[in-house]
Every structure is written in C-alpha cells, then in structure tokens.
Amino acid sequence: MLKATEGRERMERLDRADPVVHGAVLAEEARQKAQLEMIASENFVSPAVREALGTVFTHKYAEGLPGRRYYGGCEFADQVEDLARSRATQLFHAAHANVQPHSGAQANMAAYFAFLKPGDRILGMNLSHGGHLTHGSPVNFSGRLFEVSAYGVRGTDGRIDYDQVRDTALKVRPRLIVTGASAYPRTIDFEKFGAIAREVGAFHLADLAHIAGLVAGGHHPSPVPHADVVSTTTHKTLRGPRGGLLLCREKHAGTIDRMVFPFIQGGPLMHVIASKAVALGEALSPGFRDYGRRVVENARALADQVMARGVQLVSGGTDNHLILVDLRDRALTGKDAEQALERAGITVNKNTVPGERRSPFVTSGLRIGTPALTTRGMGPAEMKTIADWIADILDRPADESLIGRIRDRAGDLCAAFPLFGDQSFPIRR
Ligand code: DSN
C-alpha cells in the first residue's frame, strides 16, 4: 500500500528541477485527498496504475501494432500492448481490441471514420438530454462533419423513448446510430438499439465511456453483442489511466486499427498503454466486480436520500453510477449550486437537464456520481450523510455558516476514508 507521504518522497527531483510544477502537483494531491470527489466521470487509479504511467515507456515510439511496428526496439512495447489488448477482449468478451486511442473522443472519431464519410447521416443522443459532445454536437467535429439527427428522453419520465428512436431512425435512415451517454442515470437497452440499427441498415457505435466499469463487472448489460464497434474511455468507472479503447467484431478489426493509426493518430502513448494493461488486469479481478456493485448501491443510496429530502431527480432515480439533479423547481442555477457545494468540499459539475433553457455555462442541473468515493471505500451510510449535506445546501445555498460546518464535516469524512488508505483498492490478484 502506498503511504500518504510516498508520492511526495518520489518527487524530490521534480521539486529541485521545477518547484512551481511540484507545488501545483502537491496542492492538487491535497485537494483530491481533502474533498468529496463526486464528478461522475472521475475516479482514482491504484498506485500500480499510476506507477505504470510514470515509466520509461513514455520515451518510446511504437507506431504500428505489436509485431508490425515502424520502429525498432519495440519488444517490450509489444509485450504490454498485447497484454492490454488480450485483457480488454477477455474483460468485455469482444473479438478485437485497439488500446491506442489517446482519448474517448479519438476512439469515437476512429469509429466514425471506419464506417462513414463526411456528409453521412448519424443519429445520436441529444447532448442536453444526456448525450455527449462527440455524438453529433454542432460545436464538435461530429456535428461539423456529419449530418446529425438526435433522439432524446421522454419529458414524462426522463427515459430514452425507444419508439421515438425507431421512428426517427426509420424517417432519417442514418448510416450510423451512436448510443451511450454522459449524463443518463438509467440502464441503456443496447439490444433494442441494435435491433433498430439492423432494421434501418445502420451501423451501431456504442460509446461505453461512463459505464464501462459497470459493464465489465456485470452490473449493466453489455453492448458488445449488439454493436459493430464499442468505444470507451479507460478512466471513468473502469478506473484506469486517462485514455480510450475500441472493441469490435473481427470483420471490422483491420478497418478500426487503420482508422486509429495512421488515419487519426501517430505514435501510441506506450506509458499509457502499459498503465491501461495494469488497470484492465485489475478489472478482471473478482474485487472489481464487487467495486462495481458498490458504485451502483451507493448511487441508489444517494438518490433515495436526496429524493426523501425533496430534491428532484431526472427520471426519479438511478440504475447506474450517477444521479442528475433537476433544479428547475428552485430559484437556483446549476452553476450556483456547483459553487456552493464546492465551498462545502463537495465537488460536482453543473449539467444541462432535458428541455434545458439555460446555457451550458449556467444550466438547471447537477450531475453527481459515486465512482470515486466508492474507490475510497465509502458505502451507503456515508452516501446518506452526504445526500443530507447536499440537500441542506440546495435548500440554503447562501448560508455560509452552514456551508462552513459541512466543509469541516466533509473534511473529517475524507480523513476517515483516506485516499490510498486500507479501504481503497481492495483488489489483489
Ligand atoms: N467530459 C466527460 C464527462 O464528464 O462525462 C465526457 O467526455
């Protein structure tokens, strides 16, 4: 187990070479340790995953794939990339994996170009209904390069309306349907989406980024049997380093690989790939399945208690790792709520809600997730306490004395569940 001070000891050379960067790293480390991290897309990686990131693999150029590189000296790069690829296929029961995408956005770009040319039509989830920038937003390459139609959630219950998806797909005949979300608290029926895609002759790209760790642990149905290609980030519920990953059927393997390199990327980040291999190895352990179960259990506990306190949630609850608070019944914006919670030591992000009328910089919602606090070892009892603090602050966002009291108690809670303490990373192989 990494001692709390160990990170600092290892950075003595950084301190001598660049005290400003060293100071910023230490301040960030202190911030992460002392605040309740509830941004749904963030997590803490194990010391082993982080050590792999800081290795000599950062020096290595390895353009190409294992066994077929454009550079010499790739024996050990091949070893870690092969390990990452085989662990990814084993974890997700997929035929083929490419572990080189630098990010989820690049994984999606490679997937689009495997099946589409500019001007082709895609059907993706509306960003303000919980979709993602790369699913066709006009401010993203996906919205600029492709003709986009969008589906959303029902106004009545905040859930994806599969009949509307099918009707829209039959009407617009997209060449590709993209599924997955970044702010959708409910189970996604990838099988239904797969059937709609087949019916209209569209390719199906499933973006698993938020829920990859839940799928890996068996806590959310997998899209792998129902999609032509699956993309994900590796740093959210999957609890690996920041990066991307693609999975596909064998018949698409060559195309997907060529779209990642040489079409959209150059040299792979071998230190990140080494770290992805470690994280995927951790995700294959029985402890990780248990971690996913606790993430979901914690989100439910959080949802139940905030709702008991009169806080409105989009869809009235959660099936996964996040809740989406709807603030439209209050005289409070997402921006102001985020800031009040941050002053109390609770880090979340403002988020648009379905039917949003405010700008994305202001919003009428909050997205709150449990992956990071579950990694610290917190459980339903702590979620209930935190839910009460959140409800108190949403009721009285300008009460600085309340905020100060909660900040002190949040600090105590963090100290009781230290990052890299005994409760975190219970995974041993
Ligand atoms: N920005 C990520 C999120 O917070 O969900 C998605 O890319």
Image (cartoon, rainbow, N blue to C red):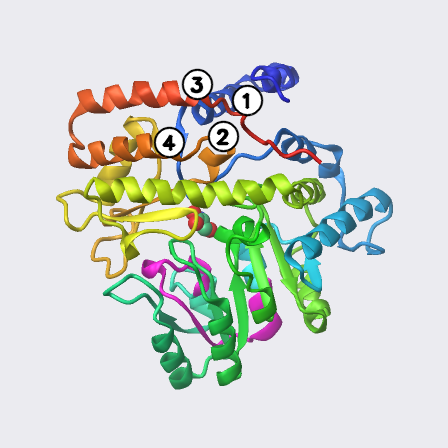
Residue pictured at 83% horizontal, 50% vertical: 71
Give the residue at the far left of this rendering: 331
Residue pictured at 47% horizontal, 40% vertical: 371
Q: Classify residue 259 by image quadrant.
A: bottom right
The image shows residue 128 at horizontal and vertical percentages of 32, 59
Q: Residues within 10 Å of mark 4 (few under 14, many from 20)?
A: few
Q: Residues within 10 Å of mark 1 (few under 14, many from 20)?
A: some
Circles 1 and 2 in contact, beta carbons < 8 Å: yes
Amino acid type, mark 3 = Ala
Q: Residues within 10 Å of mark 3 (few under 14, many from 20)?
A: some
Q: Which mark is residue 381?
A: 4
The residue under label 3 is: 415
Position above or below: 190 against 297: below
The image shows residue 236 at horizontal and vertical percentages of 51, 45
Q: CA distance from mark 4 to mark 2?
A: 11 Å
Q: Sequence order check: which comes first, mark 2 or mark 3?
A: 2
Q: Residues within 10 Å of mark 2 (few under 14, many from 20)?
A: many
Q: Which residues are magenta?
A: 110-135
The residue under label 2 is: 377
Residue 59 visible here: yes
